[in-house]
Each structure stands twice: as C-alpha cells, then as structure tokens.
Image (cartoon, rainbow, N blue to C red):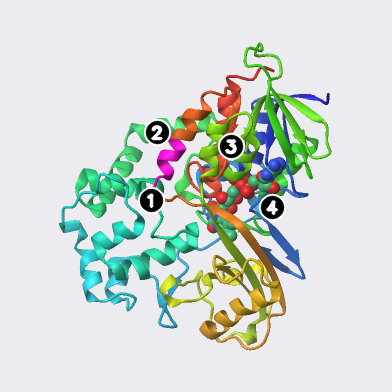
Amino acid sequence: MGHIYKTVVIGGGISGLACAFRLRQLGIQAVVLEASPRPGGMISTVRRNGFVFEAGPQCPRFPASVWNLVRELNLEKEFVAGDPKAKRYILRDGRLHLAPFSPTGLLATQLVGRQSKYRLLSEVLRNTQPPAEEESLAEFVGRKFGAEVSDYLADPFVSTVFFGDAQKMGMESAFPDLVEWERSRGSVLRGALRAYKSKRDAKKSGNGASRRDSQAKHGGLYITDALPSLGSFRGGMATLAEKLAEKLGEDVHFGAQVESITAACAENPPSAATWQVRAKGGAEISAEALVLAVPAHAAASLLQQKAPKLAALLAAIEYAPMGVVSSAYERKQVRHALHGFGFMVPRREGLHTVCTFWNSSLFPAHAPQGAVLMTSFVRTGTGGWMTAPYDVFAETVEAENAKILGISGPPIERTVWRFPRALPQYNVGHARRVNEIREALNEFPGLCLAGNYLTGRSIGDCADTGFQAAEKLRSRTHN
Ligand SMILES: Cc1cc2nc3c(=O)[nH]c(=O)nc-3n(C[C@H](O)[C@H](O)[C@H](O)COP(=O)(O)OP(=O)(O)OC[C@H]3O[C@@H](n4cnc5c(N)ncnc54)[C@H](O)[C@@H]3O)c2cc1C
C-alpha cells in the first residue's frame, strides 16, 4: 500500500493543474498523476533556435478566470498581448478576402453574393423559431441564411475554432445562446442586441458592483474589460502549465499513466479512503476524492469496470483528429505582408489546410529578427494523413501556404504534430449527453470530472471545470 492522499487528480493538462492549484489554495492535499513527461497536455510549446512553436492554442482568449491565474502565478510580466483587431482573412477561389465582422465589412466583401448579404443583414427584420429537435449548425445557417453563408462564413470559423463539421455540430450543444435568442426574440440579432443591452445595464446598475465586490472577496479582478483579451507568453503558452506545475512541485508526478481505478465500499466513513488508483509501474494510491481531468475517452476506459453507464456516455463523445504544421522562413522568402492574424480555409476550397496563423506577426518575440513563423491546422481525417511520413505531410501543407502567400523555397525550421483525437465535438445530442453524464456522476460522491468536453473547449472553460471540481470537493474532503 502506498500513500494516502486526500485527492488524486488524474491528468496534468490545464484542467487538472488548475484543479490541483485551487485545491491547494483551499488547503486540500492533492497529487496530480500525469502520463506524459511534461505538464500542459494539449498546451505544448517547442522553443528552438529563437522560435516558439505552438502545438495547441496559438493566440487564445484570456477570460477573467485565466487572468486571475496569471496574476496568482506572477506571470503578468511574461504575458504578451495579441491584437484583437488584427485582420483575419478567408480564402475563396484561391484569393484571400478580409473576414467581415461588421455590416460595412459584409456589404463590401466578395466572399458571398448579394442575396446572402441581404439574408444576413435583414435577419433582424424577420421572425423565425428554432425547430423542436436540435438542428445542426449547417441546418441552422442554411435555414436562416443559405448554403453560401454556411460554406464561406460559418464553416471556416467552426473548422478553425472547434475543428468541427457544420453538418454535425449541434446548435443547442455548441451555440445555446443563439438558439435562445431566436426562441425568445424571433431573431438571433435582436436577441444578441437585447443580451448586450442587459449586460451593459447590469454593469451600470448595482448588480455589476455587487458582482465585482464578490469577485474582489475571492481575490478576483475588478475590471476585466481593461485587460488584454487575447495573448500568449514570451516563452509560449506552455509557460502557464509549467508555472502551475512548478508551484505544485513534488505533488505532480510525471510519467504516471493511470491504468486502473477502483472504488472501495461506499459505506466507508468519509474520513477513510474510498478510491484506489494504480499507475503503470507505480504504487497504489488511496484517495478520498478523485478528479478525472483526462479526455472523455481516457476517463471512459478508467471507469469501465466501476461505472459502466458513465463510461459508455463518455466513450460516445466523438473527437476530431487534427494535424499542426509550424514552419519558419526568412522574411525575404515570403511575398505576402502577413499583416494580421492569418487566414481560414472553407472546406469547399478543397485544401488540407484549415487555417494558418501568422505567429510572428501576432508575437514578434516568437521568431528571431529577419524570420517569420506561421502555423497551420490541418485536416487529417482522410487520405491516410495520420500515418503519412511527417515530412510528406508537412510539405503538402507548406505547398498550399506557398501558393497562397507567395513563399519561395523550403522552410528554415519546422515542427509537426498530429493528434488522432484533438478536440471533443459538440455535435447534435452532446448537450443532452453531458446532462446524462452529470446525472450518472451523482452516484459517485467524491468523483469529479474536468475537461474540455463539459462546458467548452477553451482554456478558460477547462480551467473553470478544474476550479469547480475543487470547490465541489471542498465540501466533501476533510483536512
Ligand atoms: C491545435 C489546438 C488548438 C487549440 N486552440 C485553442 C485556442 O486558440 N484557444 C483555446 O482557448 N483553446 C484552444 N485549444 C483547446 C485547449 O488547448 C484544450 O481544450 C485544453 O488545453 C484541454 O485541456 P485539458 O486539461 O482538459 O486536457 P488535455 O490538455 O488533453 O490534458 C489531459 C492530460 O491527461 C493526461 N492523461 C490522459 N490519460 C491519462 C492517464 N490514464 N493517466 C494519467 N494522465 C493521463 C494527458 O497526458 C494530458 O496531459 C486548442 C487545442 C488544440 C489541440
């Protein structure tokens, strides 16, 4: 028999690390078991020859909860802000067009024709209702705006942000606000305007003040609007995970792949251990509480014996594969000015590239002077791309970028990743399944889930699930 820990957190990605960090702040003893030799999971940075290559988030949003973490970890000086107004482009017929984010941008764009523009701009004047059954994003956009808007405006965004397929993504599951706005106001735009107004009024009135007071009590931030909303760190996104792991010190065990978890008798008095966790080649650890901060499929295989119903629900969550190719060039090799965020590629264009970020334009410190760095997310679902040799895979993507951006010659540096299961898909039925998961979880007091399949895939959503798990355990775990 090994140690008895109050809480074992399985998984050292942002969800698990944030959870363990908050548990420690709450005075609860916790240990993190992470299968790989480094912290961060999907957040992974390679620093080489002056370049900062990112596997996961390139320039993510920093909501208030993540900003709180940044402050608590004293990482403000390492933070580098991204420009939220940096131009984004969308490819159509081989040419880059500015992505339209305003009515004037929409009127000017050549991405969609006159009829699509009319349907978009006149939505506010129409009255529609969502169907009773959850519809897919493609059905929703097709019903309200037509196939061209779905193909050239919706698809590139959801492919880039969720690696999602508009034909499968569920409106209630991925965009519940839009459904609610249409249901309550008969128009998405009218609903959005009303929601914006209510939020603004609440801020002006006492509600905002009392919310800020309660945030302040918990060491929160007062003025989130004044903080940069997008960014990274001088040393890349892994800085956040590395700092969390550093603070947790010896309580994070790397190379600890958990192979099984079993629950002891439920009638045990609360002070006794109720979970046994066995890691590959390691001792058995006993814990009063367990947080599974691993992908849904990994949680499913750990729970198969003890909680088959919960495991089946978790196993049914689909994950999309994704490749990432990050390539560096001398500035003079690239004809395009690369002013902006980068570009997105609609599926209809028939390329492997989903989007390309211009990293060195967003963060000049992420490439040495005289060089540029760009990172492409790549569709790997078909054509054997998950198993093709790395250089063949990368060269295919680089050739697509070369044509669009006018690049001559091979890259001077490159890093390639492939993820067979990169992100969970918020497909039709996902929201219902997550509710069922929460119900099934009620049978197991002392067991919590955290991760990107619950409330959203962003790092803020993930950290929040970790914090919530910690708060839930506070009421159960005894010091
Ligand atoms: C290419 C890409 C781009 C992205 N871009 C953005 C972005 O711009 N903005 C944004 O906010 N988010 C973005 N995300 C999403 C975000 O990075 C992830 O949702 C988030 O990092 C997931 O964190 P997690 O801790 O829940 O899971 P993970 O990062 O998957 O961590 C889970 C950890 O559990 C470990 N583990 C698994 N099984 C076991 C086991 N049996 N025993 C022990 N350990 C185990 C794994 O090794 C892993 O470290 C992106 C993701 C990807 C892949």
Give the residue at x 61% y 71%.
360
Can you give x and y, in whole percent of width and height, for residue 402 in the image? Answer: 57, 83
Residue on which the image places disc 3: 466
Q: Are marks 3 and 1 in contact (CB under 8 Å)?
A: no
State the CA–CA distance, disc 3 to disc 2.
Answer: 26 Å
Local packing at callout 1 (Cα closer than 10 Å; few below 14, some 14-19, many 20+) is many
Which of these two is toward me, 338 or 381? Answer: 381
Give the quarter of the figure containing the N terminus: top right
State the CA–CA distance, disc 4 to disc 2.
Answer: 33 Å
Which of these two is toward me, 425 or 455? Answer: 425
Amino acid type at image mark 3: Gly
State the CA–CA distance, disc 2 to disc 1.
Answer: 36 Å
Local packing at callout 4 (Cα closer than 10 Å; few below 14, some 14-19, many 20+) is many
Magenta-span inclusion, residue 431: yes
Q: Which mark is residue 209?
A: 2
- Per the image, label 1 sits on a secondary structure element best described as loop
Magenta-span inclusion, residue 312: no
Amino acid type at image mark 4: Thr
Q: Which residues are magenta?
A: 428-435
Give the foreground label among 3 and 1.
1
Q: Who comes first in sequence, dot 2 or dot 1?
A: 1
Is residue 349 found left or right of 103 in the rendered image? right
**In terms of secondary structure, what is the magenta stretch mainly?**
helix
Can you give x and y, in whole percent of width and height, for residue 253 in the image? Answer: 78, 39
Q: Who comes first in sequence, dot 3 or dot 1?
A: 1
Residue on which the image places disc 1: 170
> Is residue 277 at least partly visible in the picture?
yes
Q: Who comes first in sequence, dot 4 or dot 1?
A: 1
Q: Quadrant of residue 433?
A: top left
Can you give x and y, in whole percent of width and height, for residue 48 in the image? Answer: 76, 67
Q: Who comes first in sequence, dot 3 or dot 4?
A: 4
Q: Who comes first in sequence, dot 3 or dot 2?
A: 2
